[in-house]
Amino acid sequence: MEIFKTTFLMVGLMLLFVFVGYAVAGTGGMVIAFLMACGINLYSYFFSDKIVLKRYNAIMVDRNSASGLFEMVERLTQKANLPMPKVCIIPDKTPNAFATGRNPNNAVVAVTEGLLDLMNEKEVEAVLAHELSHVRHYDILTGSIAAVFAGAIAMLANFAQFGAMFGERDSNRSNPIVLLIIAIVVPIVASIIQMSISRSREFEADRGAALLTGSGKWLISALSKLDSYARGGHMLKNASESSAHMFIINPFSGVTKNFSSLFRTHPSTEDRIKALKEIDARLNG
C-alpha cells in the first residue's frame, strides 16, 4: 500500500510538472518537462540520500565507534523485522534526527550529537523508532521526491512568469493571464501537497514508534524536549527548507513563528503529543 502511495505521488507530480511545461511552451515544453520529470524521479530515487547526508556532514558509525547507538538501532530493527540501516551521527549540537534512503534495504538513520546529549536512553530509542517507522512506510523516498518536484515546479513557474511578462501574444503562445495564474498558484499547490504529505506521515511515524516501543510516553518526552529547545531559537547548521520535512521536528520551528498551519511541514507538537496520549491510553488502558 505504501509503495502504491509513493508511485501515485510520483505520477501525480509528474503530470503536474508536464502540465506546467505545456502551459509555458506548448507541446515542446510538455516533452521537455516530461523528460525532466523522468530525470528528476531517477535522480531522487538514487541520490537524494547521499546529497542530504553530505549537506549535514553526517558521519557513518558502527558497533566499534558508537556501540550504544548502533546496538539500539539493531534491537529496534530486529523487533520491527527491518534490515539493519546505516547509522550516522551529525556533528551539530542542535538536537534532531532524520531517516533517508530509497527503501528499507538502503536506509540511513541519522541523529545529531545534540540529540544524544539532550535525551536519555529511552527517549533516544523512541526517536529512533519514529525514524524507523518512516523507513518501514517508505516515507523517506516519498518526502525526497515531493521536495525535489516542489522545487522543480517552482522553477517552471518562474519561466511561466517571465513568459507572461515578456512573451508576445499570438496564436502559438499561451495566454499571459493563464501563465501568471500558473506562476502564482502551481508552486503554492505543490508546496501544500508536499507539506500535507509530510504532516500526515509524521502522525503515522509517531504511532509506529509507540507501537514499536510499547509506549508513547518516551516519544512524548522527547518531542517536548525538542520543541522546548527549538523555541529557544536554536537552529541546525546547514538547515534548508527543501529538507526540513525529513527531520523529526522542523529545524526552522524556533525561528519561523505564527505561520499558517497549511504551510507547516510538521503537525504542531501539541497535536502530536495529544495523538500519542490517545495511542498510549489504548496500549496501556
Image (spheres, rainbow, N blue to C red):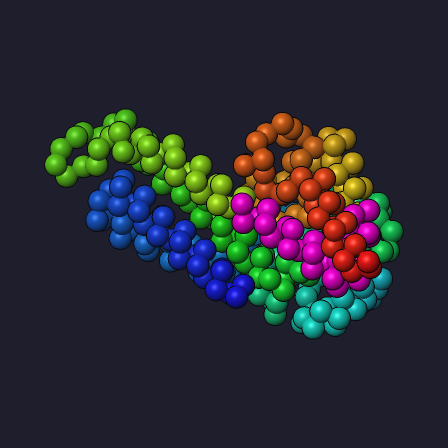
- For this view, does 132 lie left or right of residue 118? left
Q: Which residue is drawn at 68% across and 66% down?
A: 85
- Residue located farthest toward the left when viewing the structure as drawn: 171
Q: Which residue is drawn at 21% across and 36% down?
A: 174
The answer to whether residue 225 is seen in the rendering is yes
Q: Looking at the rendering, in which quadrant would you find the C terminus?
A: bottom right
- The verdict on residue 84 being magenta is no
The answer to whether residue 110 is seen in the rendering is no
- For this view, does 125 lie left or right of residue 247? right
Horizontal and vertical percent for residue 45?
Answer: 50, 60
Magenta-tinted stretch = 196-221
- Residue located farthest toward the front when viewing the structure as drawn: 285
Horizontal and vertical percent for residue 5?
Answer: 49, 60
Kindly indicate the quadrant of the structure image that contains residue 67: bottom right
- The verdict on residue 214 being magenta is yes
Q: Nearer the viewer, residue 112 or 103?
A: 103
Q: Residue at x 27, y 33 (%)?
A: 178
- For the image, the number of numbered tags is 0
Horizontal and vertical percent for residue 111?
Answer: 73, 52
Q: Residue at x 74, y 51 (%)?
A: 278
Q: Nearer the viewer, residue 138 or 47?
A: 138
Kindly indicate the quadrant of the structure image that contains residue 281: bottom right
Above or below, 258 relative to 52: above
Above or below, 74 relative to 232: below
Kindly indicate the quadrant of the structure image that contains residue 215: bottom right
- For this view, does 200 lie left or right of residue 210? left
Above or below, 67 relative to 151: below
Horizontal and vertical percent for residue 272?
Answer: 70, 45
SS assignment for the magenta stretch, majority:
helix
